[in-house]
Amino acid sequence: MKAIILEQAWGVENLLYKDIDTPNIEKDEILIETRAIGINPVDFKMRSIGAIIDMLYWNNRPVILGWDIAGIVTKVWSEVTNFQLGDRVFGMVNFPGAWKAYAEYVAAPENQITKIPENVSFEDAAATTLAALTALQALQGNVKPGERVFIHAGSGWVGHFAIQMAKHFWAHVTTTSSAKNKDFVLSLGADEHIDYRSQNFEEVCSDMDFVLDSLWGETLKKSVHILKDGGRVISLPDPQSVEAISDVAGSRNIDASWLLVKSSAENMMTLAKMLDSWIISPTIANTYSFDEMREAHSELETGRTVWKIVITL
Ligand SMILES: NC(=O)c1ccc[n+]([C@@H]2O[C@H](COP(=O)([O-])OP(=O)(O)OC[C@H]3O[C@@H](n4cnc5c(N)ncnc54)[C@H](OP(=O)(O)O)[C@@H]3O)[C@@H](O)[C@H]2O)c1
């Protein structure tokens, strides 16, 4: 099969289109013929950090990036009963952990994937995996009807799912983006918009019940100031920034935590239902063919991609 191999870390030129053996399936796995791959900022971060690749792959080469896939079941482990040959499936495979999704065939544990609803394309399914799971795992159970929710970077990939889900949970949503994406985030259901380039959110917002922070730097520290006492903040970038605000958060009874998204078939089923009933809808910016992975990474790396980049096979 064809796969995109990484022989060393750093630039996009290290993504190599090669022939390798099709993976064998192990206990409780299914083999998926890939039809679409979703790519995420974490993909190019991993590509650039040799130490992480060495840690995750030191005895598991070749290195194949990617987690988000949609495709067709071509083989199932003898005791797997939930899937049959020919099923259309999608999921985020083995996150956090060694990934293997930039390939024509992917071996996936059955407890990490689910079936694609009939009316949903492979591209939309692949686009509704890691970022959508992150938004779901951050918001589900954390947002109650009528609460005031603040979502940073609502035009970003996690943010744009988070807005749609928070509205589904009947929250009042305030979000940030640049001015050019104001109409987009409002069209997703956001009630209020702040242009982060011309306004400081911490000066114009207050009394929030919940904040979803997906930005690096000082954002988390400033976010604590817009929360009610007893509010909640989930941060995505790194656990250290959460540690850094623990004193001030604790003094106001604010629950501050870092979330690391995890593969889950149960959560994928929720996403499948949300897709099927139009509660969430992904917006795809661009599709690239499998042999254009370098171009796709280069576009994503600009950090200005509002909508999803999907690879089709
Ligand atoms: N911990 C986890 O499990 C986990 C899971 C998923 C993602 N993440 C992390 O979460 C972050 C977001 O991921 P993503 O896929 O949503 O990113 P993304 O789609 O690449 O985000 C890009 C968006 O960020 C917006 N943006 C940039 N600077 C901003 C600012 N200062 N204020 C408000 N918006 C700003 C831009 O908006 P404009 O174009 O409107 O300027 C752009 O649309 C990444 O760092 C990712 O690694 C962590």
Image (cartoon, rainbow, N blue to C red):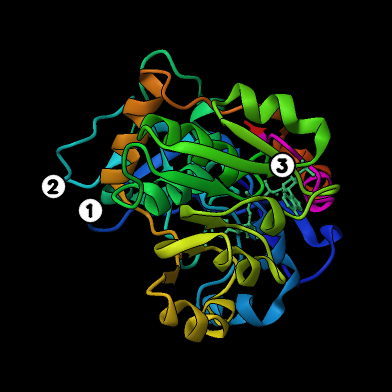
Inter-mark Cα distance, 3 to 2: 52 Å
Depicted 150 relative to depicted 278: above or below: below
| Residue behind mark 1 | 28
Answer with mark 3 or mark 2, whichever residue precedes in sequence: 2
Q: Position of residue 264 (x, y in %)?
A: 32, 51
Figure label count: 3
- Tell me: 99 left or right of 304: left
Q: Secondary structure at mark 1?
A: loop
Which residue lies at the image location 57% right of the left edge and 54% below the top edge? 206
Contact? badges 3 and 1 (CB < 8 Å) = no
| Residue behind mark 2 | 79
Could you tell me the amino acid type at mark 1? Asp
Contact? badges 1 and 2 (CB < 8 Å) = yes
Contact? badges 3 and 2 (CB < 8 Å) = no
Q: Quadrant of the C terminus?
A: top right
At label 2, counting other C-alpha atoms closer than 10 Å, the crowd grade (few under 14, some 14-19, many 20 or more) is few
Q: Position of residue 70 (x, y in %)?
A: 48, 34
Residue 1 can be seen in this image: no
Could you tell me the amino acid type at mark 2? Glu
Mark 3 or 1: the one toward you: 3
| Residue behind mark 3 | 194
Residue 54, label in figure: none
Q: Nearer the viewer, residue 224 or 122?
A: 224
Inter-mark Cα distance, 1 to 2: 7 Å
Tell me where the magenta segment starts and ends, as one range. 298-310
Q: Residue 177 falls in which quadrant of the image?
A: top right
Depicted 68 relative to depicted 5: above or below: above
